[in-house]
Image (spheres, rainbow, N blue to C red):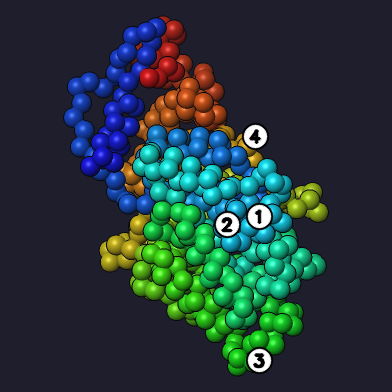
């Protein structure tokens, strides 16, 4: 296929170096037979906590393609901002974006989707519901419960508080229409509706929600079930397949279509429970793949605070991940793949490249080649990735002191230090 040829050429390009105008390889002759171990190999970027210009996203897509990542999970909006310009719902971005310059127009989305497609990457959007929606109140206050309620820790996992009034028929209709409108901007068959970190106290304290529940004779979970069924039916009507965070499978008794995909994030050990319920899953475990972990507390009220998912997740940690750990042979068939994720509370254009690369390349190899790789033999490949990225304009971080490369290469080739250039100048 065309995509297979593209992936093959990506591998072929990784075999070659340039030194003083001479192109050469260290591995000839070679005979490569290759195919991906998993169909889903992703990277998630949150563009709501902080805004990333289109050019940053395109550069990230370039880097993804160089390590054969094939899905860009775009967490485009959240409680903090709504930068997506949605036809028919333009008030959301007009009042919810950080500024008129920090938005993604339909033309921007079309450009990003096309740019990704040309590199073999699918763009899966996420509009998280019914939680993580505080910003919607800026334009449609009637649909949001506990808007910016205080103290925020009683109403949300992070500020600002605010969730969709899921028991309201009007809010359910509004949300269904919004998701369908967003879906029209994207070609992907996958669409994430979120469903994580629902705060029940927000609804307990909201008079409008309590009145709706009483009038309908429903519990909160029953109202959530109605909400999810309605919004997912709307997406199915426009040809989309729903993706949700694991809570909608494990924590709430809601009705999900059999083809719903679950993102397993709270703990890698929860994959077995998701598979046991018969749902396809994507590994997005915070204990392996959260790129923001280790950054410290960001709210500012506790100077000794740590990030909730400490410690920092090294590339070695993610590379050690086994997608089939604790799964039966039958359950292993439910694993579609996995991804690294960047939640952007403490990230922006200035540190996008170094916080993502080359760490995200480690999971790219796991979900392309399968588990069981050796960290020692992976390290030189990751060095290679880092140097190639730097030469192509992606600011990947160093993995070791340069001395380590001098020492290892000189020992391997028993030659003078100048020969270490062979590892630094790639084609």
Please rate how many residues cluster around mark 2, counting C-alpha atoms within 10 Å: few if below 14, some from 14 to 19, many from 20.
many
Q: Who comes first in sequence, dot 1 or dot 2? A: 2
The residue carrying mark 2 is 86
Which structural element holds mark 3?
helix
Gap between marks 1 and 3 measured at Cα = 33 Å
Q: Is residue 351 visible?
A: yes
Q: Who comes first in sequence, dot 3 or dot 2? A: 2
Badges 1 and 2: C-beta atoms under 8 Å apart? Answer: yes
Please rate how many residues cluster around mark 3, counting C-alpha atoms within 10 Å: few if below 14, some from 14 to 19, many from 20.
few
Gap between marks 4 and 1 measured at Cα = 23 Å
Give left or right: position of 128 versus 157.
left
Nearer the viewer's eye, disc 4 or disc 1?
A: 1
Nearer the viewer's eye, disc 1 or disc 3?
A: 1
The residue carrying mark 4 is 350
Q: Residue at x 36, y 32 (%)?
A: 377
Q: Residue at x 43, y 29 (%)?
A: 385
Q: Which mark is residue 214?
A: 3
Q: Which mark is residue 93?
A: 1
Nearer the viewer's eye, disc 3 or disc 2?
A: 2
Gap between marks 1 and 2 measured at Cα = 8 Å
């Amino acid at each position: 296929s065309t995509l297979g040829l593209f992936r093959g050429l990506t591998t072929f390009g990784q075999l070659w170096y340039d030194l003083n105008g001479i192109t050469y390889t260290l591995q000839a002759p070679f005979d490569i037979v290759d195919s991906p171990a998993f169909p889903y190999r992703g990277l998630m970027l949150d563009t709501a906590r902080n805004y990333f210009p289109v050019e940053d996203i395109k550069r990230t897509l370039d880097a993804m393609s160089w390590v054969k990542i094939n899905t860009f999970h775009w967490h485009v909006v959240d409680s903090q901002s709504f930068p997506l310009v949605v036809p028919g719902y333009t008030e959301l971005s007009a009042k919810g974006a950080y500024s008129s310059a920090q938005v993604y127009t339909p033309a921007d989305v079309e450009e990003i989707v096309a740019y990704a497609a040309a590199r073999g990457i699918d763009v899966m959007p996420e509009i998280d519901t019914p939680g993580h929606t505080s910003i919607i109140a800026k334009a449609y206050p009637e649909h949001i419960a506990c808007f910016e309620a205080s103290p925020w820790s009683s109403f949300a996992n992070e500020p600002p508080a605010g969730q969709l009034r899921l028991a309201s028929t009007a809010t359910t209709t509004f949300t269904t229409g919004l998701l369908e409108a967003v879906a029209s901007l994207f070609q992907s068959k996958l669409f994430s509706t979120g469903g994580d970190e629902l705060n029940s106290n927000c609804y307990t304290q909201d008079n409008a929600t309590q009145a709706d529940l009483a009038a309908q004779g429903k519990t909160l979970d029953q109202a959530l079930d109605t909400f999810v069924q309605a919004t997912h039916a709307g997406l199915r009507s426009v040809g989309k397949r729903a993706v949700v965070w694991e809570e909608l499978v494990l924590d709430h008794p809601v009705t999900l279509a059999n083809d719903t995909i679950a993102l397993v994030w709270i703990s890698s050990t929860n994959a077995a429970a998701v598979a046991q319920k018969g749902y396809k899953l994507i590994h997005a475990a915070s204990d392996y793949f959260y790129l923001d972990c280790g950054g410290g507390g960001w709210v500012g009220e506790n100077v000794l605070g740590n990030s909730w998912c400490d410690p920092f997740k090294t590339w070695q940690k993610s590379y050690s991940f086994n997608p089939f750990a604790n799964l039966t042979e039958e359950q292993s068939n439910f694993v579609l793949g996995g991804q690294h994720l960047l939640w952007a509370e403490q990230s922006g254009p200035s540190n996008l490249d170094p916080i993502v690369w080359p760490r995200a390349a480690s999971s790219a190899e796991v979900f392309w080649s399968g588990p069981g790789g050796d960290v020692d033999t992976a390290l030189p490949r990751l060095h290679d990735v880092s140097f190639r990225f730097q030469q192509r304009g992606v600011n990947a971080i160093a993995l070791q002191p340069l001395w380590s490369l001098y020492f290892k290469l000189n020992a391997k080739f028993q030659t003078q230090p100048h020969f270490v250039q062979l590892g630094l100048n790639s084609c």
